[in-house]
Image (tube, grey):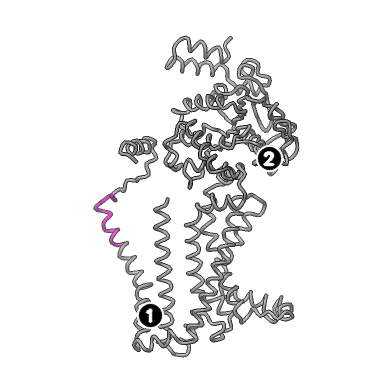
Amino acid sequence: MYVQMEHIYKTFDGFHASSDVNFGVEKGQLAALLGPSGSGKTTILRMIAGLDRPDSGEIMINGVRVNDLPGSKRGIGFVFQNYALFRYMTVADNIAFGLEVQKKSKKEIKSRVEELLELISMQDLGKRYPHQLSGGQRQRVAFARALAPNPQLLLLDEPFAAIDAKVRRELRTWLKGMIGRVGITSIFVTHDQEEAMEVADTIIITNQGRIEQVGTPDEICLHPQTEFVADFIDAARYEALAAARVAKELSYSGSQKLKSRYCSH
Amino acid sequence: MTKREQRTYQQDIVGDGISSIQKVREPRREESGQGIRYLLIGICVLFLFVMLVLPLIVVITNALRDGWAAYREAVFDEYTVKALQLTLLAAAAAVAVNTIFGVFASYLLSKFYFRGRQILAALIDIPFSISPVIAGLVFILTFGNVGWMGDFLKAHGIKIVFAVPGVILATIFVTFPFVFRELFPVMNAQGKDEEEAAALMGAGGFTIFRRITFPHIKWALLYGVILCAARALGEFGAVSVISGHLRGKTNTLPLHVEILYNEFNTTAAFAVSSVLVVLAVLILIARNVVEKFSRAKE
């Protein structure tokens, strides 16, 4: 396991944000923390990043206990929900920031920034400021900025929440493709089951600060282990949703493929 | 930028619905609204004339009543110059202390969550709600000869009340919340995501402040500094209580005006007042320039 959470507890002013959280994510995997709002998924992500401290329990990254390590020493990249791009810096400066802090040479920074701008297909937009970009472009910059210092683990907090529904699906595919191409272990938070099903290799379902179930999308769909999961993952609705979408935009063979991926019987 | 690039750039911005060019709408002209508009304008102009313009005219005409020579004599009088120096010193000290304090306090209260946050924020506002005279008395009771710390200060030969340190302390006290009040809403609205993002990339506290926080707050900071300076220059109540009115020693410009006026030296009083007016106008201009620039940068 690349990331391992063991018996994590966390309370905020008496509110149990995490109670006995246990799960692991394997190297190279793309995992989704899925649950209703207030179920503690963002807290888990922030604890892995070192932005919040667990009250008790162990956080292991690559076999090392990181509880007492500051976030900047954990080898992670973090994409914030609203991207938190530095608004008074250009796109290129945003991406370069992490490298400048690490005191990399000017030449190295320049070539890395160019490489990342190319990766997100924004070579010509390096001199723009964040407020001159569309939501999707901002997300891509946030992604590139998080990747710039070559982290081993990428954490994304509701990466699609700030993007309007129309382009969301397109970005989802793009992000999954990118993460696959970079080959980085990633964990993202979402409250949208469709999103989790479509993007993740592993889904971790959270509810009231607890982990309800961990498994592949198929496992979660076909064998929900708790009543909550069965309720939350509405398989029938999901199938209908997929079918409706398919009828609209995909071929028949596509529909079969989708159905078999999501809970076919 | 080539023409083509420029076009796609504009398309991008407009296409994404984040056009930075806002259409300036003509106010709707309704017949019934016209009357009210002129009435309100009339009230405003009348009010401003009676409250601001008329007193200003009185100050200037009275100051020059006995001619330029008398004016110059009053303004370049030894005690006036000393009072001006002390006023500027106190204002500079207040601005320096309150800028540092205001930045720290608003950083603390906007970026960290802890018990008693709200109480602390309320405490900072106390100088706004307490009468400056009472503030001056509090300092006398604390640092004066019969005061709480009187024996300690006397033993160490430190003089605060009826001395320059007291004047500076009182000025700092009354101008205490200005920078904080300007900065806090701006910092609070910024949130802490950008700072957290920078920290996660390994940036230290000072780098984060210099590169992330400061560019965001600089105009609000400057605006707060200007308001603080304006208030410090004009402070009368607290300083009046604590200074002891020692001419050439603890007299500030507003106190000097009062002394001259009480001595029936009206022309000199108005002449010295006009110096304060000039300072106020300079600050007003600075304020407007800052406001214009900060809006242009948004």
**Which secondary structure, mark 2?**
strand
Say if residue B249 shows up in the picture: yes
Q: Is residue A231 left or right of residue A86?
A: right
Q: Residue B7 falls in which quadrant of the image?
A: top left
- Give the residue at mark 1: B59
| Vertical comparison of B214 with A34: above or below | below
Discs 1 and 2 share one subunit: no
Of residue A219 and residue B278, the one placed in the foreground of this image is B278
Give the label on residue B268, or none.
Answer: none
| Vertical comparison of B253 with A73: above or below | below
Q: Are marks 1 and 2 in contact (CB under 8 Å)?
A: no
User: Label 1 sits on what residue type?
Assistant: Val
- In the image, residue A215 lies at what x, y percent? 65, 21
The stretch in magenta equals B26-39
Q: Residue at x 60, y 25 (%)?
A: A30
Mark 1 vs mark 2: in front? 1
Mark 1 crowdedness (10 Å alpha carbons): few <14, some 14-19, many ≥20: many
Q: Residue at x 55, y 12 (%)?
A: A260
Instruction: Name the chain letter of the residue that bears numbered label 2.
Output: A
Magenta-highlighted stretch: main secondary structure?
A: helix
Say if residue A34 shows up in the picture: no
Instruction: Count every numbered label the image shows and give the total.
Output: 2
- In the image, residue B113 lies at what x, y percent? 64, 49
Does the magenta segment cover residue B30? Answer: yes
Of residue B174 and residue B119, the one placed in the foreground of this image is B174
| Vertical comparison of B125 with A121: above or below | below
**Which secondary structure, mark 1?**
helix
- In the image, residue A100 lies at what x, y percent? 56, 44
User: Label 2 sits on what residue type?
Assistant: Phe
- Give the residue at mark 2: A15
